[in-house]
């Protein structure tokens, strides 16, 4: 990691190709990374600059309306009084009515601000500073640092005395920030939504953050460069170090500001001289290579031996019900079964044929009991018809 280096190079601000000096790496820049803490603190801190806002207290009640009560087969919502217009008799006041108040109208006495724990805030700042020294995290945030000599980028204190924006732009380009500045200018776009009507018409990406110790004109020189911000090392703000709650901002340090970090945060043993009752956060693990720790001889020698898997017994299957198991036990069972099946089919065919012959011989259709019985009734019916015909002839 970049934070493991003992010293950092200091570049001459007006001639960045020259290394003026080296300074020791402050221990705060080796703090453990806590993206969850940075996001949580940033979310709460960002709420502390909100202004109270709500709908008008009388909204939706600016008309005269009373309920018609029961008995008229209409809803009991208040209705506009009077007559002669379409508005008369329409529902009012309720959140379901046109022109009525909103449901659970917002109030100005909402809890807008959040109290942020000071120690957590300091831990978040330390984490954001450490992330700014790691090129992968800085590049992941979208910064163009391909031409930058090294991170953290420290320049001589002469940059603090600049007062002209043109000179500041030249220095930034020489430091390798030309691609970064171009990206910022190209990213300027009109904001989506209502904000474009509320004095925040444009959006733009964040650029480098210049951290200084003494303002001898550097703030005035940098303030008009798009995307570039300045901050005093004694008043570092997480909202600038991790915009949007994402750490890894590209930071340019002056030599005095970089040395001041050790005076402010100290070391993990000495504590922070300028921050009362504060110590730098410690990593949960000194060695983050978990696989190497688990597979080490010291750990493996203390572990119980690996347990053997219990024996697995095959579930017994009845071969008389399973053809697969029967075929494994008796390969000729399938052949024998096919022979038996053919014999069964043959016997069935013979049985059906014998049954048909028996029915044809012994169960003739005209000699069945039912048909014999019905023939007797048919003879009686014929006789009764003949009698009726004879009686009709005699009458004639």
Image (spheres, rainbow, N blue to C red):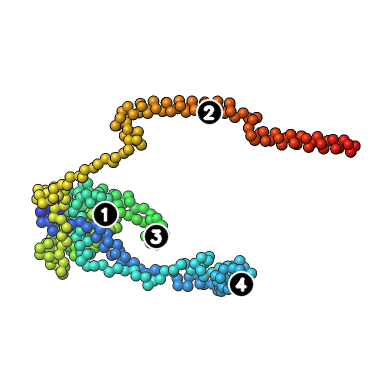
Circle nearer the N terminus (3, 1): 3
Q: Which residue is mark 4?
A: 71
* Nearer the camera: disc 4 or disc 2: 2
Q: Residue at x 15, y 67 (%)?
A: 274
Expressed as whole percent of the image width and height from the top left, the position of residue 113 reads 31, 69
* Nearer the camera: disc 3 or disc 4: 4
Q: Disc 3 to disc 4, how far (Cα)?
A: 49 Å
Circle nearer the N terminus (2, 3): 3
Q: Disc 2 to disc 3, how far (Cα)?
A: 97 Å
Expressed as whole percent of the image width and height from the top left, the position of residue 239 reads 27, 61
* Nearer the camera: disc 2 or disc 3: 2
Expressed as whole percent of the image width and height from the top left, the position of residue 25 reads 12, 56
Q: Which residue is mark 3?
A: 195
Q: Disc 2 to disc 1, how far (Cα)?
A: 102 Å
Q: Which residue is mark 1?
A: 207
**Residue 89, placed above or below residue 395:** below
């Amino acid at each position: 990691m970049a934070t493991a280096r003992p010293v950092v190079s200091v570049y001459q601000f007006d001639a960045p190709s020259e290394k003026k000096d080296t300074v020791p790496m402050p221990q705060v820049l080796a703090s453990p990374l806590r993206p969850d803490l940075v996001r949580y603190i940033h979310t709460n801190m960002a709420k502390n600059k909100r202004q109270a806002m709500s709908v008008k207290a009388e909204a939706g009640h600016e008309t005269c309306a009373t309920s018609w009560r029961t008995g008229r087969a209409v809803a009991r919502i208040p209705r506009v009084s009077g007559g002669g217009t379409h508005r008369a008799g329409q529902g009012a006041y309720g959140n379901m009515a046109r022109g009525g108040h909103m449901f659970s109208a917002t109030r100005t006495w909402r809890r807008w601000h959040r109290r942020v724990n000071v120690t957590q805030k300091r831990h978040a700042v330390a984490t954001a500073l450490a992330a700014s020294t790691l090129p992968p995290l800085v590049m992941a945030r979208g910064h163009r640092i391909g031409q930058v000599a090294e991170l953290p980028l420290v320049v001589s204190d002469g940059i603090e005395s600049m007062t002209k924006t043109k000179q500041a732009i030249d220095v930034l380009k020489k430091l390798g920030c030309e691609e970064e500045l171009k990206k910022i200018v190209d990213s300027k776009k009109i904001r989506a939504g209502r904000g474009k009507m509320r004095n925040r018409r444009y959006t733009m990406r964040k650029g480098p953050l210049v951290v200084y110790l003494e303002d001898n004109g550097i703030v005035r020189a940098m303030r008009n460069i798009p995307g570039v911000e300045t901050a005093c090392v004694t008043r570092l703000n997480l909202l600038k170090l991790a915009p949007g709650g994402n750490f890894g901002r590209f930071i340019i340090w002056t030599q005095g500001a970089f040395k001041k970090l050790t005076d402010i945060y100290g070391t993990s043993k000495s504590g922070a001289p300028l921050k009362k009752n504060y110590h730098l956060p410690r990593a949960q693990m000194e060695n983050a290579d978990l696989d190497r720790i688990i597979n080490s001889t010291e750990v493996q020698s203390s572990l119980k031996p690996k347990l053997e898997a219990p024996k697995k017994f095959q579930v017994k299957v009845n071969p008389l019900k399973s053809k697969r198991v029967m075929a494994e036990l008796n390969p000729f069972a399938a052949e024998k079964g096919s022979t038996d099946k053919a014999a069964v089919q043959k016997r069935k065919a013979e049985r059906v044929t014998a049954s048909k012959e028996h029915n044809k011989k012994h169960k003739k259709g005209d000699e069945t009991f039912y048909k014999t019985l019905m023939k007797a009734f048919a003879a009686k019916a014929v006789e009764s018809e003949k009698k009726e015909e004879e009686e009709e002839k005699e009458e004639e």
